[in-house]
Amino acid sequence: MVFVIKISGLGCGSVCRTSSNKSIKHLCRVHLSTLSISFFASSPFSPGSLQILMKLKSTLLQTSNTSAFDSRESSNSMCNFTGITCNSQGSITKIKLSHQNLTGVLPLDFICQLQSLEKLSLGFNNLNGPIMEDLKNCVKLQYLNLSNNLFTGWSVPAEISSLSQLQYLYLEGSGLSQTFPWKSLQNMTGLVQLYLGNNPFNPFPFPKEVLQLTNLTWLDLCNCSIHGTIPAEIGNLKELIYLGLWGNNMTGKIPVEIGNLVNLRKLSLSHNSFIGKLPVGLRNLTKLEVFHFSMNNLEGNLSELRFLNNLVSLRLCENELSGQVPAEFGEFKKLVILSLCYNSFTGPLPQNLGSSAKLYIVNLSMNFFTGQIPQYMCKQGTLSVLYMYGNNLTGEIPASYANCSTLLDFRVNNNSLSGTIPTGIWGLPHLLNIDIKWKSIEDPITSDIKNAKSLSTLYAGHNCLSGELPAEISKATSLKFIQLSDNQLSGTLPNLVIKLKRILTIFTTIDLSSNKFEGEIPEVLGKLTVLRLLNLSHNSLTSHIPSSLANLSGLESLDLSSNRLTGQIPIQLTSLTFLAMLNLSQNQLTGPIPQGKQFDTFENNSYDGNLGLCGFPLSVNCSTNELLSPPLPSILQEHNDSIFGSGFGWKVVLMGYGCGLLFGLAMGCVVFNFKRGNPKWLLRFVKENKTQR
């Protein structure tokens, strides 16, 4: 009946308007999908292809929340379906449905019935189950991408050697396990890119089949359980641009044949157990841009790398490398990332390092570098992270870093630096972390810290910082960690709290120990509801411990030792159920130690030097009155401390003792008179009182 419509030269609408035939009118009301199939029956396009697509749609829509199959043009041609490409004969050649939130089992049994299919791209979805053996029927495939899905392995038998035309195979991060069908690669001599990384395969040695794929330009076998050594035959893959083997269990030395890979631009071998020196052949890899070799057991120096002036990223952290950084590194113009941390490098750094390069990350920490910090590493205005801690660097922090507005993380602690902090560093607008502890930095923290709106962590302990903290520190509204211990900072804590009042509620760590702070511990510290550590030890703080500290429900460490605190330990502190460390030693505290919960876990050294304390865990027992007496209110306790501290309290005690003695003698006389007869004055007094009642 469809052919009748076409022969008449009338569209469906015309037929419906002109015909009285009920069957023709019924045709005009047919469902869209049925009409589409009928249309293709009269067209040059394969009806089987459409049926396969409709079946693919119905299968995946049962389990997927996707709009991938919604977008179709009005022509009803299957070649206008989303992600579908056809050739001039109307046969489907490409299915591209990556990133479409597809779920369910991939129906390869009928997808691979598309005899002209050359490209199948379904990466970055949530497809699951095994990859069915029907994949072997997609014999025309040149491009296959099933990466980043949730497959569980291969159906048995795993055999895809029939895909001899395959050039691009992407299966990385697809959840494949068990054993990959390596022998199938023998027929895929035209492979250009092979990505199998990030799959939990059964452990296997470097596959020899891969070494025959001499057309490979990209080879990714990262994090997929390879063990053993890199075969010398790797040098046969001379077209390689990228070689990725990081995150495996590979051992042995790097073969010198790797120097044959002269087209290599990216070499990633980190997170293995390689040993030995960098092979001599590396100097031939002059196109190399990325060289990542961190977390291995390499030794020797970097002399082979001084010829690689196209390097963009060099990562060699956590090895056993030594020697000096080649002077040529200072001339590298493309260098963006330089990471040499946790090795045994020595000597001075090239002072022109970064003068011509747009450095972004520099991590030279935990080595034995000497000399000064190179001053040009932020010359191009791109430096974001500078880690140079744990070396033997000397001199001052270069003034040029005060203008490094791109800096996010600045850590030069644990060196032998001296002098002052350049004006402007405290107030870098995007700085998140600053760590300058364990140096001999002098002068106070300056008022430009008000510009540090992003500053979260301030570590400046073990220096020679002096003076009071500037009031402008309250404008550093992101500050959460402050560690200023072992300096010469002064002032009272109440003043400090006033300066910090805008940001108190976000603090998690405060360490102001070993300074010259004085006065009382302010009650407002109890509002630091997220505080985990409070260390005010080794200052000159006086008065009592505020009971408001009991509000710090998450507090894990409290150190108030070596001050001049007096009074009792607030019993309310027993509510701090996360408190793991308490040090109140070397103060002038008195009374019973609170009992229960975390306080039952602390030992004698938490209370040493407080001669007036008693109770567990000390050997000094408390009297009954001490155990029953609640802690005095803070004002009264403070008043009593001042009275007894001045010596006046003993006069009051003696006066009370004298009055009691006189009263006792008078009552004795009364009792004596009763024996001689009822005294008239006493009887009169009692009688008057009864009348008043």
Image: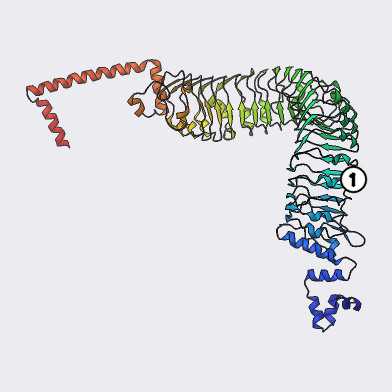
* 682 left or right, relative to 227: left
Image point (89%, 69%), residue name:
43
Residue 477 lies, with reference to residue 613, above or below; the image says below
Image point (77%, 63%), residue name:
55
- Residue at mark 1: 189
Q: Secondary structure at mark 1?
A: loop
Query: Where residue 414 appears, x then y in whole percent?
Result: 68, 20
Frontmost residue, 598 versus 226: 226
User: Residue 643: which quarter of the image?
Assistant: top left
Frontmost residue, 561 versus 83: 83
Label tally: 1
User: Would residue 492 be visible to someone looking at this image?
Assistant: yes
Quadrant containing the N terminus in the rendered view: bottom right
> Which color mode does the image show?
rainbow
Residue 120 lies, with reference to residue 345, above or below; the image says below
In the rendered structure, which amino acid carries the disc numbered 1? Thr
Residue 653 lies, with reference to residue 119, above or below; the image says above
Quadrant containing the C terminus in the rendered view: top left
* 612 left or right, relative to 533: left
* 655 left or right, relative to 55: left
Q: Residues within 10 Å of mark 1 (few under 14, many from 20)?
A: some
Residue found at the far right of this picture? 88
Query: Where residue 582 appears, x then y in whole percent?
Result: 50, 26
User: Would residue 546 be visible to someone looking at this image?
Assistant: no
* 238 left or right, relative to 359: right
Query: Where residue 232 appears, x then y in whole percent?
Result: 86, 32
Frontmost residue, 204 versus 273: 204
Query: Where residue 244 appears, x then y in whole percent?
Result: 81, 37
Residue found at the far left of this picture? 677
Frontmost residue, 166 versus 416: 166
Image point (46%, 18%), residue name:
609
